Amino acid sequence: MFSWANKDGKKKDPELFQTVSDGLKRLYKQKLFPLEDAYRFHDFHSPALEDADFDNKPMVLLVGQYSTGKTTFIRHLMEQDFPGMRIGPEPTTDSFIAVMYGEQEGLVPGNALVVDPKKPFRKLNAFGNAFLNRFVCAQMPNPVLDSISIIDTPGILSGEKQRISRGYDFAAVLEWFAERVDRIILLFDAHKLDISDEFSEVIRALKNHEDKMRVVLNKADQIGTQQLMRVYGALMWSLGKIVNTPEVIRVYIGSFWAQPLLVADNRKLFEAEEQDLFRDIQGLPRNAALRKLNDLIKRARLAKVHAYIISALKKEMPNMFGKENKKKELIANLGEIYTKIEKEHQISPGDFPKLAKMQEILAGQDFSKFQVIKPKLMESVEDMLANDIAKLMTLVRQEEANMPSQQVQGGAFEGTMNGPFGHGYGEGASEGIDELEWVVARDKPTDEIFYTLSPVNGKVSGNMAKKEMVKSKLPNTVLGKIWKLADVDKDGFLDDDEFALANHLIKVKLEGHELPTDLPEHLIPPSKRGL
């Protein structure tokens, strides 16, 4: 599948990768890491990746102001308390807690975590003891954690509390996690929509990861429908000012805990929203390989741009005198260098690192140690992006096809899977699923309409049925599907039972429900069963 060039320029025999994870590791080590290392990428942007970063389970990062229900949300998903869990109206979670699967229940402190090669946290060592003393891993045997890991974060402070220093760069730590997780969930309390300065800073730090972000408007059962509409509008307005993207972030509305709803007016809405969010989380294991591939591509694009920037700075530096003054001048004019590189190499402005951050880091760097562009390193990364990634994509699809049922199971995910409390049970096409009587018989007053359509031998033709069905104003594509479902014996005509069934399916669609792909057993007319 893959062929690699050796030092003599001759191609080796094609090398097959067994898994996507294996392919990503080799591509990174052999093609991308040399470029990162040569141009000090790790000093500016992100530490080098390790095997654990490619092998770890999908991770979900929860972020929000204090008392928005982050820890309760995790407990709701797992239906079980986890070690180190504290819940209360005050800022109770003062640590980053990685909730992961483990045969034995217990806590692993941060300093021990960052030396464990099997965990993807080794590079967090750079944030120092102030952070590591506030970082733990809660391990426990829970079926939900068999498929995903969840990162609980300290509540983001507001008011006077946000002026208290944490002792480490909170936004930088969240950015580190954001690069590596599969989903970022921002939680808001329907009663406290104010976005503090620290929360705004955090959301901006997550700017390049909008594709991973979802928003949960929690505790929505504590307010009525009219108030909820106003709160939702206010939330979207607030997010629009901070996120700065034309696309709207998906917002899930509900009450994510196992307690009775205080205001049950919007119960159906909450159930539908919870089901959508659960489906999103359940799909993470299946899409994990694609996400890692996507993140590697993003990293490679940034590494290329970074190399061009470092090379441009090196070329401008004098050999002997005036180095310090020239360095200050180059940093001040970095925006112009960005523009020059953008035009010279046809690079999108969105691929460049943040100007202010780059200037800040460059001030502490020794420009004399920078290198000019090495064509071989750049060609290697270009080849990776142009050829190897496309081939690896094929392997991703193969892995997905071999594991179609891979999804998160257990905990709250099981509660609504089957039985009468499953989402949509007894509604739409499922109405009457557990009744002895044929549910369509309730609509049999349509018999009067049926006999006005001049049936022949107890059946109406497609043309006559169409005259009545189009009165629903549904598009022909939908009515065509209803016809196929209702014509149970496939004879091109509808008898009175089939006509009643067609009208029942029209009613289902008009009420906003989806039509089934195949006719469910309970909707088949009794006279047609066993055919």
Image: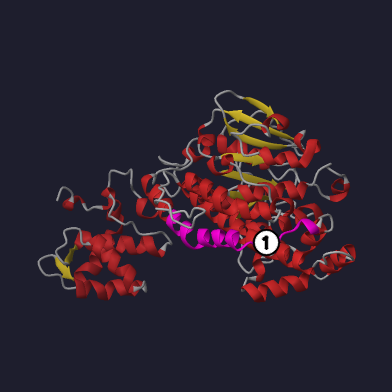
Left or right, 59 with respect to 207, comes to left
> Horizontal and vertical percent for residue 280?
52, 50
Amino acid at pointer 1: Ala
Whether 371 is among the magenta residues is: yes
What secondary structure is marked by label 1?
A: helix
Position of residue 343 measured from the top left corner of the image (x, y, whole percent) = 66, 76
> What coloring was used for the rendering?
secondary structure
Span shown in magenta: 368-393
Report the residue marked by disc 1: 307
Q: Quadrant of residue 210?
A: bottom right
SS assignment for the magenta stretch, majority: helix
Q: Is residue 163 above or below residue 385?
A: above
Q: Is residue 93 left or right of residue 429?
A: right
Density class for disc 1 (Cα within 10 Å; few <14, some 14-19, many ≥20) is many
Residue 78's x, y, as percent? Answer: 56, 35
Residue 104 in sight: yes
Q: Residue at x 69, y 66 (%)?
A: 244
Give coordinates of residue 196: x percent, y percent. 80, 54
Q: From this viewpoint, is residue 218 visible?
A: no
